[in-house]
Image (spheres, coloured by chain):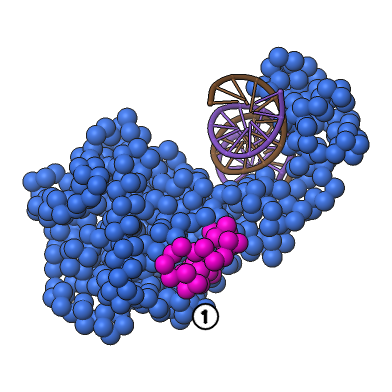
Chain colours: A blue, B purple, C brown
DNA sequence: AAAGGGGACAACCGCCAGTCT
DNA sequence: TAGACTGGCGGTTGTCCCCTT
């Protein structure tokens, strides 16, 4: 993987020889005044730098240029040394163990390359970063989850343990662990509480080591949307319709949807995909022909649903664990003129709801909040970065955290109630779900931007009242802003509002009536029963 | 054989935080 | 205390190689 500096072989070679010879032509920020060299390093330069560092040690990089005559700025020298010349660098491809570690670390840390590198002796942050980015692309193209389920579980379990050690979330007893988990306790708590929004993998509970899921109301196995595979690789840009087709995070919420019976197969396939150079050649775990997957409980699993942005649509500050993995995303939804923007910038599909299999581009698959310029003041289309939704969501998280503090039972009940979803409960979940910082979860923006009302969101639609009510029910120090966020969430949930009898987004994305929708109109009371029963 | 696309990776850029003066 | 300096970090870019079509 890593090539020796002296091997400056191929690339850069040409460019280097040209640019490298033109002293002064490549002045950058750090060397503008002096006309220092840029571009690829030559062996001679490497030798000079090596000698200098050997003699003087690392640091004081700006002095290198002065004392060694090297026409490189200090930054460049440091980078060259750190990434290529350091004697302790490990060369070659990552070992399977290293790869596993990288994935695990990324699940924990997000795009903290330097910290990850610290955990991988001999590896540089740049190397890891490149590896990861490449890997992400590959997985996205293959429509596979970024993180293997076992890694997700591991991370979750780790967090759970941390909570066990410190039920109050102060986590003061274990600085190391605390340091290792930059994920705010609050976020993780809410993450747990909120798993209901992402329910569909009950079988996951059977995964060894997942016993934590069975505690604290984890039974609904929700937070696993991030493990949902996305669509098989696409060849054309996804249309707006596809963009809004499936509120993956929203998902059905109905516990009954559940994981395809052979979820383990998915993990296997995932693992396989990791090694398969050509993801397109995968025997896709989502192959519709796989009856195990597509016919679970007579419903197509979400995994098979095109447009499942389960974990690929995170708006994601790239530094966010899990969600951070989504950084390789296009700037925004890709609007087409076949679609209309509703009040909050979401797409209102006007074309066929059933995209072709190849319609989902793995790149466009990932979404960022639409540029604010394109969707000004749409109260619903809230960018986690700009609209205050983050605060709103955090507030919601706080609220839920508080709720959670009331006791595991209540939290458990709350989680379980997601199955039968009285609106209040649903609302709450949505708010939490929207936490952009939530590891293994989705940002509000991603959720909101992805889930688009199937029929638009004009206020005169059936679900409007409910939405407004929902928004109005939200009281927070953030006032209108918060309400706007809630309205946005409500907007997203239009399908629910339109079909109150459907526990969760029944509707039909792609013309599919997907599973997980417990379309029974069960009285909320049942939820209590279920909750009591352990979900 | 040529073209196109993806993978790999080195290097640069901009920002930020800590330290120094 | 403020500004400059330095190092570190994460994101992005640009190039070549390889494979597929």
Which residue is at a point 47% across and 73% down the rendered structure image? Answer: A164
The residue lying furthest to the bottom in this view is A533
Residue A487 in magenta stretch: no
> Viewed as shown, does residue A379 lie left or right of A219?
left
Q: Position of residue A17 (x, y in %)?
A: 80, 25
Q: Chain of mark 1?
A: A
Whether residue A413 is visible to the viewer of this picture, yes or no, is yes
> Viewed as shown, does residue A187 lie left or right of A391?
right
> Viewed as shown, does residue A438 lie left or right of A387?
right
Which residue is at a point 59% across and 49% down the rendered structure image? Answer: A112
> Viewed as shown, does residue A369 lie left or right of A92?
left
Prevailing SS of the magenta stretch? helix
Q: Position of residue A330 (x, y in %)?
A: 44, 40
Is A212 drawn above or below residue A457 in the view shown?
A: below
Front one among A363 and A236: A363
Q: Position of residue A65 (x, y in %)?
A: 81, 24
Whether residue A491 is visible to the viewer of this picture, yes or no, is no
Quadrant of the rendering where the C terminus of chain A is positioned: bottom left
Residue under label 1, please give it.
A208
Front one among A109 and A322: A109
Judged from the image, the secondary structure of the residue bearing numbered disc 1 is: loop
Q: Position of residue A408 (x, y in %)?
A: 34, 75
């Amino acid at each position: 993987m890593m090539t020796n500096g002296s091997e400056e072989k191929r690339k850069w070679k040409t460019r280097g020889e040209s640019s490298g010879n033109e002293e002064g032509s490549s002045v950058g920020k750090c060397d503008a005044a002096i006309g220092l060299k840029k571009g690829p390093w030559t062996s001679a330069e490497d030798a000079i730098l090596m000698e200098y560092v050997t003699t003087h040690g690392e640091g004081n990089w700006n002095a290198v240029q002065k004392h060694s005559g090297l026409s490189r700025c200090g930054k460049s020298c440091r980078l060259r040394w750190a990434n290529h010349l350091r004697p302790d660098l490990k060369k070659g491809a990552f070992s399977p163990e290293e790869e596993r570690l990288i994935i695990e670390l990324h699940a924990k840390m997000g795009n903290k390359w330097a910290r990850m590198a610290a955990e991988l002796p001999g590896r540089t942050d740049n190397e890891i970063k490149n590896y990861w980015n490449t890997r992400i692309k590959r997985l996205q193209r293959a429509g596979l989850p970024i993180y293997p389920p076992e890694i997700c579980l591991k991370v979750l379990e780790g967090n759970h343990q941390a909570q066990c050690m410190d039920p109050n979330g102060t986590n003061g007893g274990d600085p190391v662990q605390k340091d290792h988990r930059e994920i705010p306790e609050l976020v993780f708590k809410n993450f747990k509480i909120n798993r209901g929004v992402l329910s569909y993998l009950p079988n996951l509970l059977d995964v060894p080591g997942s016993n934590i899921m069975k505690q604290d109301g984890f039974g609904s196995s929700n937070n696993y949307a991030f493990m949902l595979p996305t669509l098989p690789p696409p060849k054309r840009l996804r249309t707006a319709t596809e963009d809004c087709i499936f509120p993956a995070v929203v998902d059905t919420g109905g516990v009954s949807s559940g994981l395809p019976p052979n979820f383990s197969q998915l993990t296997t396939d995932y693992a396989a995909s990791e090694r398969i150079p050509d993801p397109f050649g995968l025997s896709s775990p989502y192959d519709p022909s796989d009856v195990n997957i597509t016919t679970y409980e007579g419903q197509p699993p979400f995994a098979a649903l095109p447009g499942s942005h389960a974990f690929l649509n995170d708006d994601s500050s790239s530094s966010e664990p899990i969600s951070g993995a989504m950084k390789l995303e296009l700037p925004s939804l890709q609007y087409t003129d076949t679609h209309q923007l509703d009040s909050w910038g979401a797409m209102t599909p006007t074309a066929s709801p059933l995209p072709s299999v190849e319609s989902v581009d793995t790149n466009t698959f990932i979404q960022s909040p639409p540029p604010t310029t394109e969707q000004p003041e749409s109260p619903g289309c809230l960018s986690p970065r700009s609209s205050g939704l983050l605060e709103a969501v955090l507030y919601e998280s706080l609220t839920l955290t508080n709720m959670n503090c009331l006791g595991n039972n209540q939290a458990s009940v709350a989680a379980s109630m997601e199955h039968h979803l009285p609106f209040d409960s649903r609302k709450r979940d949505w708010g939490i779900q929207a936490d952009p910082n939530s590891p293994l979860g989705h940002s509000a923006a991603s959720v909101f931007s992805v889930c688009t009302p199937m029929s638009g969101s004009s206020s005169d639609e059936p679900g409007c009242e409910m939405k407004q009510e929902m928004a109005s029910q939200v009281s927070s120090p953030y006032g209108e802003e918060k309400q706007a966020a809630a309205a946005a969430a409500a907007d997203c949930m239009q399908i629910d509002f339109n079909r109150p009898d459907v526990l969760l987004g029944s509707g039909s994305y792609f013309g599919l009536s997907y599973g997980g929708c417990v379309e029974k109109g069960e009285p909320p009371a049942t939820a209590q029963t279920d909750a009591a029963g352990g979900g």
